[in-house]
Amino acid sequence: MSEPVIIRVSGLRKVYRAGQVDVQALRGVDLSINRGEFVSIVGPSGSGKSTLFHVVGGLTPPTSGSVEIDGVDLAKMGETGRTNMRKTKIGFVFQKYNLLPTLSAGDNIAIARHIAGKADNSDAWFLEALKLLGIERRLDHKPRAMSGGEQQRVAIARAIVTHPAILLADEPTGNLDTQNSQAVLALLRELNHKLGQTILMITHNPEAAAFADRIVSMRDGRIVN
Amino acid sequence: MLNKLVMENLKHRPVRTLLSVCAIAVEVTMILTQVGVSRGMLEDSQRRARGVGADVWVRPPNSSVLSFSSASMNEKLVEFFEKQAGVVLATGSVSHGIGGIEQITGIDLEKFSKMSGGFRYIAGGPFRNPDDILVDERYADIHKLSVGSKVKLVNREWNICGIIEPGKLARLLLPLPVVQEMAGATGRVSQIFVKVDQPANAQRVIDDLKQKLPDYKIYSIEEFTSLFSASNVPGLRAFNGVVITVSVLVGFLVVFLSMYTAVLERTREIGILKSLGASRGYVLSLMVRETFVLALIGTVIGILLTYGTRVLVNFYAGPSLTQVIVAEWWPIAAAIAIGGAILGTLYPAWKAVQQDALEALSYE
C-alpha cells in the first residue's frame, strides 16, 4: 500500500508584478508527493522551481490553484494561516544557511522549537537526527565559528526539530564545496531513509538531484516530466 | 528563548546598545536632576523658613510665597505687631537680590537671635563693624571662605565675621539697615516674623491680624512652609515640564533611530524568524523586549548618574542650588523613559512585522 499524499499541488499559477509587467512564474503546476518521499525539482534558472518552493513553503501566496500540505490548503489561507503552517508543518533549508548570527548553533535549533511552541530539543527522534547530522559537539558555537558544511547541518537540524510534515531544501549545497555537498546530500538521504522525513529539494545540479527517489523537471513555469 | 535572543542581539551590537543606553540614561538623569534641584531648593527654603522660629509669617500684599518680594512693608508694622495681644516678639528682614537667585538678607541680629534661638557659630561671631557679614557653612565651604576672608558682593568688599550653621533664614546675612540702604528701602522690610506667647494661640493671632490688615499675606509657619511646592513657584512647573519633554524627546529620537537602524540591519534575520513561523506578535515582542531592556539598563544607570550630578550641582552650582535625590521619582522617570523608548520603537517594530518574509530573506 502506498504512503498517503502529503503535498498535493493542483493547477498552481503564480504571477509576479515586476514594475509594470506581469511575470508568469508558474503556469499551472500539478504535483503530488507522498509521505516519506525524497523528491528533487530540477530546472534551469527562471523555470519556476524557486517560486514553487516559496509557494509550497507558504512564503508567498499562489495567484490561483491549490497547495495542500498534509490535507490543509495553503491557497485558502491568509498571512497568519501560512505563518502557522510554516511553524508546524514546514521546515526550510536555504542555500545561504540563514542561521541567526547572534545565537549559537544549539540556540538556532532551540528557537525554531520555541517559535513552534514546543518545550525542548530532547526527544529521541531529534537526538537520533542530531547524531546523524554529527553536530552534537558544535552546538555551543556561533555560526561564524563554523564551516559552511557545519552551518548547513545546523540549518537541517533546525528545519526538522519541529517534526515538520515536509522539509523544503532550496539549493542546499549551492554554497558548499564538493566534499561538504556530498556529506549534506547523504545526510538528507539518511534523514529520509532512516527517519522517514519527506523532503522536497530544489536544485539545478543533476548530481545533487540524483540523491532523491524521484526527480521532477520544470521549464517555463511548468512541470515537464 | 526570546529573552536570550534579545540579550544576544544587544551583545552583538555593543556600540548601538551603549549609545541607546547612554541616551536613555541621560534622559533619566536630566529628569531626576531637574526634579532633584527643584525639590532641593524648595526643601532648603522650607528648612530655612522653619529655622527662623516664628509662628506667623507676614508678607506684603500681592506677593507670592517664593517670589523675591521687594521691601514694601513699612518697618513700623513691626512695632504694630508687637503690640498685638498674644504676640511676644516681631522682627523684620529685607532680602536683596545679588545676581542669579542669590540674595543677601538684612536682619535685626538681636531680635532675630531671640526669635530663632540664636545662630550657632562654627567660627567667628556676630557683626561688629558695618562691613561685617555672616555666611553659612555651605556658602563658606563652596567659596572656600573663613573668618577674616574678604568677599566682594554688590560692588562692595565685606569682611566675614562669622560662619554660621545653615538652616536659619538665609545664607548671607547683614545688619538690617545696611541692606535697607543697599536696596534703597530705608524704613521698609520685605517680610515680618511674629512669635506668639503660646503656639496654640497662633491661629487666633492670625485671624485677628487678618482682620486688621486684610490686604497682607499672613500665614502660620505650617501654612507658609506647606506652600513651598513647584506649583507655587512661578514658572517652575512649566520649566520642569519643558526639561522633561526635551529629555523624553531625546530618548525617543535616539531609540527610534537605533531601532530603525536595527530593523534595517536585521531585515534578513527577521525574514529567517518569519520563515520559521514567527508571528507578527513574536517579532513585535522581540523588538519591544529589546527596547525594554535598553530602557531598563538606561534607567538604572540614569539613576546612578543622578548621584554624580548631585555632587556636581552641590559643588559647582553655588549655594543657592541644592540637589536632592528624589527616590519617589525613580519609578516615574523609569515609566517616562521606558514609555518614551517603547513609543520610539513602535514604528520600527511595525516596519519589522510588516516585512514580507520572502523579500526579507533575499535582503543582502
Image: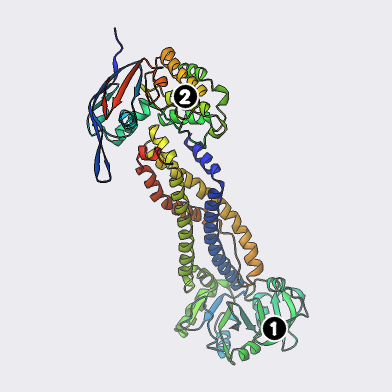
Quarter the C terminus of chain B occupies: top left
Q: Please, what is the three-letter code of the amino acid marked with disc 2? A: Ala
On the image, which quarter does residue A159 sit in?
Answer: top left
Q: Which mark is residue A157?
A: 2
**Which residue: 48% across, 20% down?**
A182
Towards the viewer: A225 or B168: A225
Q: Tell me if residue B146 comes above or below residue A191 in the rendering.
A: below
Q: Chain of mark 2?
A: A
> As drawn, which residue projects farthest toward the top?
A1
User: So how many labels did they put on this image?
Assistant: 2
Secondary structure beneath label 1: strand
Q: Decide if residue B136 is on the left or right side of residue A8.
A: right
- Nearer the observer, disc 1 or disc 2? 2
Estimate how packed mark 1 is, as few (under 14), some (14 to 19) or many (20 or more) residues with alpha carbons within 10 Å.
few
Q: Please, what is the three-letter code of the amino acid marked with disc 1? A: Lys
| Residue B69 locus on image (x, y percent) | 53, 82
Is disc 1 in contact with disc 2, using a CB cutoff of under 8 Å? Answer: no
Estimate how packed mark 2 is, as few (under 14), some (14 to 19) or many (20 or more) residues with alpha carbons within 10 Å.
many
Disc 1 to disc 2, how far (Cα)? 80 Å
Question: How does the figure colour the protein chain or chains?
Answer: rainbow
Secondary structure beneath label 2: helix
Q: Which mark is residue B152?
A: 1
| Residue B327 locus on image (x, y percent) | 56, 56
Q: Are marks 1 and 2 on the same chain?
A: no
